[in-house]
């Protein structure tokens, strides 16, 4: 029997992390109505001009990212226009640009670790002024009404979460375009304040890698007296080590890369385990209160579930394109262990995380790149060759609009 068109394989069933709330039909409609919507928007706004913007986009799952010119809306009443100075490069950008989660609409302009300077505000904006530093993370809007939004957990909005890229753009139609670009316009409710004492390019990764690790560490009350494992020393993993250490936990890093052992200790791990070494892994059994798994590829979860103590939790934040092999249920039953997941963090908690990082002098370890190196950076990310986050210097974008 033919299976063409029937989503029956596990790969087919993989749902795009950042697009799961948006049906494909909705995406297609949004895309095809783009031009008409821009014209409608201009009519509604007294024919106001759009903002000419230059960025880098992927035009298909296999095409390298390249220069892309597009338009953003002029700031409305509650909007903030930010001239983007730096944008971090998250593994989710790669998953989306290459359509690994399915649901990508092209062209796609990735980037959701954005810091910059405010150049314009709408008349209703209260919290930002021209010249302020400002940041934008993974979301630019949500329904604002559902119980999740009301609780400040917009990332779990049941109705309409609008991600910074690859979500339907409510204002001008088409899709939202992210931070691999020179400016962005966002409602102030989704704009964050940046501590002024930190190195600005190294703040950018806090907007995703920082909050994605801060939120579960806080939710599962990691602190003094906890023994915490962090799996995978990449962008998310290195922030998890720094934050868990700052919360006072005993931190054990699990890495597949022996070359990262010294770095893991410098970043704040008290012990480092090479996860490919089964003798070393066996010695870690039954000792962890909490394990944060940041790995971007499918792997054996049992190897880590075995390390939890009774009632311990392993939280998955890594979101590989293909599923992990199913864990052995006995590893959960014996020890009442829990396997869970977590998605970024709400706006209120993101601000709390930025303020915490300001107070404790915490930033990301970064390698700055010009935008022209983005495709090479993706390849290095796939080889686990990132120390520990690439950050794009947007001054390298072409000047002609
Ligand atoms: P990254 O910088 O590429 O780091 C991932 C790390 O995973 C690597 O450095 C490597 O660490 C380990 N790894 C990679 N391939 C592996 C393999 N085949 N086997 C074992 N370990 C492997 O990626 P990232 O930006 O931190 O993102 C990690 C994942 O989190 C991605 O899937 C991303 O989409 C997802 N994410 C989720 C959320 C959320 O809200 N849940 C938010 C952001 C990102 P070692 O060299 O130390 O082994
Ligand atoms: Zn991200
Ligand atoms: Zn909502």
Image (cartoon, rainbow, N blue to C red):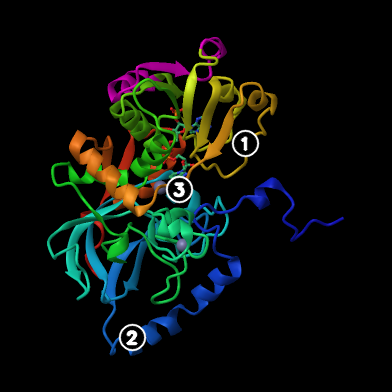
Q: Nearer the viewer, residue 315 or 397?
A: 315
Check whether the beta carbons of the residues at disc 1 and disc 2 lie within 8 A of each other.
Answer: no
The residue carrying pointer 3 sits among few (fewer than 14), some (14 to 19) or many (20 or more) residues within 10 Å by Cα, namely: many
Distance from disc 1 to disc 2, alpha carbons, whole Å, reads: 47 Å
* Residue 230 point in image, percent of width and height: 43, 27
Q: Is residue 39 left or right of residue 276?
A: left
Q: Which numbered disc flags the more N-terminal residue, 2 or 3?
A: 2
Pointer 1: what residue? 324
Would you identify the image quadrant in which residue 336 lies? top right
Q: Quadrant of the N terminus?
A: bottom right
Task: Give the vertical position of 23 relative to 322 (above or below).
Answer: below
Part of the protein shown in magenta: 259-283
Residue at the (61%, 21%) spot, across then down: 335
Pick whichever, 339 or 20, lies toward us: 339
Q: Secondary structure at mark 3?
A: helix
Q: Residue at x 44, y 84 (%)?
A: 36
Q: Quadrant of residue 385?
A: top left
Q: Residue at x 32, y 42 (%)?
A: 390
Q: Are marks 3 and 1 in contact (CB under 8 Å)?
A: no
User: Is residue 266 a member of the stretch shown in magenta?
Assistant: yes
Relative to 299, say whether 137 is above or below.
Answer: below
Q: Is residue 135 visible?
A: yes
Q: Which mark is residue 236?
A: none
Quadrant of the image occupied by residue 169: bottom left
Q: Which mark is residue 92?
A: 3
Q: From mark 3 to mark 1, how far is it between C-alphas?
A: 17 Å
Q: Is residue 185 visible?
A: no
Residue holding disc 2: 42
Label 3 CB, ligand 1: below 8 Å? yes
């Amino acid at each position: 029997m033919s299976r063409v068109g029937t989503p029956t394989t596990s790969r087919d069933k993989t749902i795009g992390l950042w697009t799961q709330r948006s049906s494909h039909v909705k995406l297609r409609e949004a895309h095809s109505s783009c031009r008409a919507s821009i014209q409608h928007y201009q009519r509604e706004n007294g024919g106001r001009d759009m903002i000419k913007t230059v960025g880098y986009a992927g035009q298909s799952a296999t095409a390298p990212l390249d220069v892309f010119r597009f338009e953003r809306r002029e700031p409305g009443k509650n909007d903030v226009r930010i001239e983007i100075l730096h944008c971090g490069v998250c593994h989710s950008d790669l998953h989306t640009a290459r359509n690994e989660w399915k649901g990508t609409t092209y062209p796609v302009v990735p980037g959701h670790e954005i810091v910059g300077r405010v150049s314009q505000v709408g008349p209703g904006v209260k919290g930002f002024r021209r010249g302020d530093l400002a940041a934008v993370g993974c979301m630019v809007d949500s329904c604002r009404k559902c119980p999740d939004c009301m609780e400040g957990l917009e990332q779990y909005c049941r109705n309409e979460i609008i991600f910074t890229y690859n979500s339907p753009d409510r204002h001008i139609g088409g899709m939202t375009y992210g931070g691999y670009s020179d400016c962005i316009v966002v409602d102030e409710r989704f704009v964050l304040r940046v501590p002024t004492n930190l190195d600005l390019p190294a703040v950018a990764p806090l907007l995703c890698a920082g909050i994605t690790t801060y939120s579960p560490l806080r939710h599962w009350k990691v602190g003094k007296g906890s023994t915490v494992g962090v799996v995978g020393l990449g962008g998310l993993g290195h922030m998890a080590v720094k934050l868990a250490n700052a919360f006072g936990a005993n931190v054990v890093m699990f890495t597949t890369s022996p070359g990262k052992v010294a770095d893991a200790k410098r970043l704040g791990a008290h012990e480092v385990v090479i996860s490919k070494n089964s003798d070393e892994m066996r010695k870690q059994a039954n000792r962890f209160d909490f394990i944060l798994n940041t790995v971007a590829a499918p792997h054996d979860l049992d190897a880590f579930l075995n390390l939890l103590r009774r009632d311990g939790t392993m939280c998955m934040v890594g979101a590989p394109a293909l599923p992990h092999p199913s864990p052995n249920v006995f590893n959960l039953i014996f020890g009442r262990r829990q396997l869970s997941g977590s998605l970024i963090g709400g706006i209120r908690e993101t601000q709390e995380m930025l303020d915490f990082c300001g107070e404790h002098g915490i930033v990301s370890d970064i390698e700055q790149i010009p935008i022209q190196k983005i495709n090479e950076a993706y390849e290095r990310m796939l080889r686990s060759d990132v120390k520990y986050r690439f950050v794009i210097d947007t001054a390298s974008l072409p000047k002609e609009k």
